[in-house]
Amino acid sequence: MYTDEQECGIILEDTPLKTIGAEVYMYNSAEMSGEHKTVIKGNSAKYVKLNVGGSLHYTTIGTLTKQDTMLRAMFSGRMEVLTDSEGWILIDRNGQYFGYIVNYLRDGTVALPDSRRELLDLLQEAKYFLVQDLVKLVEAHLKRLGKDDVEPVCRIPLVTSQREEQSLISTTVKPVIKLICNRHNNKYSYTPNSDDNFLKNLELFDKLALRFSGRVLFLKDVLGSSEICCWSFYGHNQKIAEVCCTSIVYGEQKKHTKVEFPEAKIYEEALNCLLYESRHSRPDAELMKATRGFGTNNGAAGYQSDEEIEEMLDRVRTSNNKKK
């Protein structure tokens, strides 16, 4: 049984002292910021809101107390937890992996991340919350990988069917960027610059995948659809944007297929996609505005350097931190 607040990982605020004359008054800084302690209890069907390291989660008491873990102690009414003014329960841990823990408690199984680094991070969180069965599962998976296995820096699934695509998009906890690149779908001859632009789209996809593979699931479709070159962006398992790079143009005697490379628009939607990393809240208008129009202000060439991309990412991070 876990009853000690510090052992169970509840956020505790320092209690400063304020002196007025000869008297000393004690106040809690959490109360000054609208935060307060409360006891969470109720039937197993009751839903609770959790803010774990800035990542928002919404689940039932029954799920959180299903196994004998630290979370059962926190949500069985035996101890106080810290909540903010909007009723979110605050837990100061890595929220990126808390979804794996909730899914495991709910279903008794969970699809584990691929990379060793993510597995080690998940293992640390599973040990912290004392989810012993998940600890054993992750440790066994790490053992199968082997200590000396060389891990790819980036894995990009090649989609082979619409069913497979839907499964990948619906089960991931990450935003998704998908590129359809099927040059043989064309019915007409290409315009002079189309081949170069087709390759530029592929090169940009590879560049983004290397840069954001830990935060975004990248998919490449080389079989399906009638499209030739088209980007799709997904957040919270729903399509949020699409950038089609092909069009039909008319020559003097016949039609031609034109492939374009709208670099600035692709970067813009990729940055917007990153704003959907939080699973249970949509990005607000200010965050979306921070990414809109940045590339177009730099002229037709759009994003020219990694420095410009870092500047945009810093703006998004700054806006995001202000909202937390």
Image (tube, rainbow, N blue to C red):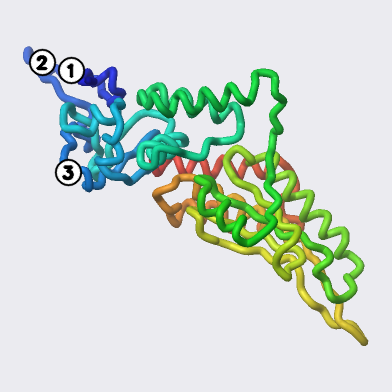
The kind of residue tagged 3 is Asn
Residue bearing the label numbered 1:
17
Residue 264 visible within the image: no
Query: Which of label 1 and label 3 is nearer to you?
Result: 3
- The spot of residue 245 in percent (x, y) is 74, 65
Location of residue 99 with respect to 264 vertically, above or below: above
Query: Residue 263 vs residue 232: left or right?
Result: right
Residue bearing the label numbered 2:
24
Q: Which of marks 2 and 1 precedes in the sequence?
A: 1
The kind of residue tagged 2 is Val
Q: Residue at x 23, y 27 (%)?
A: 73
The kind of residue tagged 1 is Leu
Query: Which of label 2 and label 3 is nearer to you?
Result: 3
The answer to whether mark 1 and mark 2 are in CB contact below 8 A is yes
Residue 196 visible within the image: yes
Residue bearing the label numbered 3:
43
Q: Residue at x 53, y 47 (%)?
A: 172
Query: Residue 312 vs residue 2: left or right?
Result: right
